[in-house]
Amino acid sequence: MNLMVDILINVVIAFLAGSLLLGLHRKVMARVQKRPGPPIVQHLIHSLKFFFKETAIPRTVSKVFYIGIVFILALIWVVGVIVGPVAHDSLLILFGVYAVYKIVEHNSGSSSGSPYGKLSCVRAVLSAASELPLFAAIVFVYLVTGSMNIGEIISYQSVHGPLVFSIPLAALMFFMLIITKSPYSPFAITKDKVLISGFETEHFGFLRGFMLFSESIAWYVMLWVFLTIFFGPLTAVGYLIGMIVISFITGFINAATPLLSPNHSVMTQITIGAICFFGTILMIFTGVVA
Amino acid sequence: MLDYMIYILTFAVGSILGLVYSYKQHGEPFVAVTKFNVPFAIISIIGWVLGFCSGNIILSAIGFLLAGFVMGERPGYGRKETAVGLIIAIIVYFVLKYSV
């Protein structure tokens, strides 16, 4: 199939699946809290709705940056789709995508000129703590499989079995990132309700539409990468079940935990990351990991 | 991947249509409906069975549209019907898989 068509199909799937999964996540949270919650398709409808809303641009913004940043945000997650589900390329590029995402989060807040956005921008720097466990997890996957290439990691797992059984603590580190990225997460310090909508507060209309579009794709890409590098070669049904299960689990966790303060959030992430990091090293040196 | 895109697209469209339809039928504030809607259960069963077991892109797409229509109803409606449809479809899938 033509590469461009393949990319387009995968981006549409990522957007729709990500939106429905985020809708499910919100529904699970609501049910845990004994509320009926919105319909599962609500997140998708919201995302589409914003594209047709009036777009107002506040006077205080740095206009070029303020508008450009949402396109960069959408673009980096489209790159995530290309590197992951389409090309099965290097994990290092995906790490780069996540790192750029953090920069975009930071700059989106700072370009808005709003105090809420600016505070969220400062917190985006702190929340980079979630990248350290991600990088460590990728390093361990490399140490075990001898490759950063997703295609080769899948081949390795088809011979040796899913990596989650050999390096479970590295999988836990990656799962921490997924929890961090999920909506209403205890670690979502950039979108604390004290900051209204954090770095998204001053983005309206189609600009917010692009942000929601990117969020849906980001959720899909991260779940896809997690399932692919830790749960071996999966069929489409396997991915579907895996993504639904993870959305359920994160929904339960987020519904039952309050948002942590920034310092507690960073310390918790780093502590869990450090325990998993040294635990995995211990497993490698004691020969538990072959 | 084109087939998966069609399935998810039809499911999403079905959900939106179901939501719009059920809000037109039931404008009242939220009520947890205990009544079992037989026609919607039949639509759900046909939808999920076609979606999982037909093996044909067009039939599966129609199936997911119907399944999405019932599942996408406003909160409080279509839950039991969806559960019944899904369970029957999974049973039919395994029966067909292991009987052939």
Image (spheres, coloured by chain):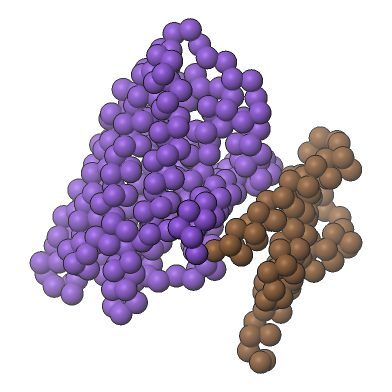
Chain colours: A purple, B brown
Q: Looking at the image, which is closer to me, B83 or B33?
A: B83
**Furthest residue toward front:** A2
- Check the image and report above or below for A98 versus B99: above
Q: Residue at x 66, y 39 (%)?
A: A45
Position of residue A160 measured from the top left corner of the image (x, y, whole percent)? 28, 78
Quadrant of image for the C terminus of chain B: bottom right
Task: Decide if residue A122 is in sight here.
Answer: yes
- Check the image and report above or below for B96 versus B52: below
Q: Residue at x 56, y 32 (%)?
A: A209
Position of residue A7 measured from the top left corner of the image (x, y, whole percent)? 48, 53
Q: Quadrant of residue B29?
A: top right
Relative to A184, A84 lies left or right: left
Q: Residue at x 41, y 27 (%)?
A: A69
Relative to B92, A251 lies left or right: left
Relative to A208, A286 lies left or right: left
The number of callouts visible is: 0
Q: Quadrant of residue A60?
A: top left
- Check the image and report above or below for B59 versus A221: below
- Check the image and report above or below for A211 versus A95: above
Position of residue B94 measured from the top left corner of the image (x, y, whole percent)? 65, 82
Q: Looking at the image, which is closer to me, A189 or A53?
A: A53
Q: Quadrant of residue A195?
A: top left
Q: Residue at x 52, y 67 (%)?
A: A236
Task: Decide if residue A10 is in sight here.
Answer: no
Position of residue A134 measured from the top left corner of the image (x, y, whole percent)? 28, 49
Quadrant of image for the N terminus of chain B: bottom right
**Furthest residue toward left:** A285
**Furthest residue toward top:** A59
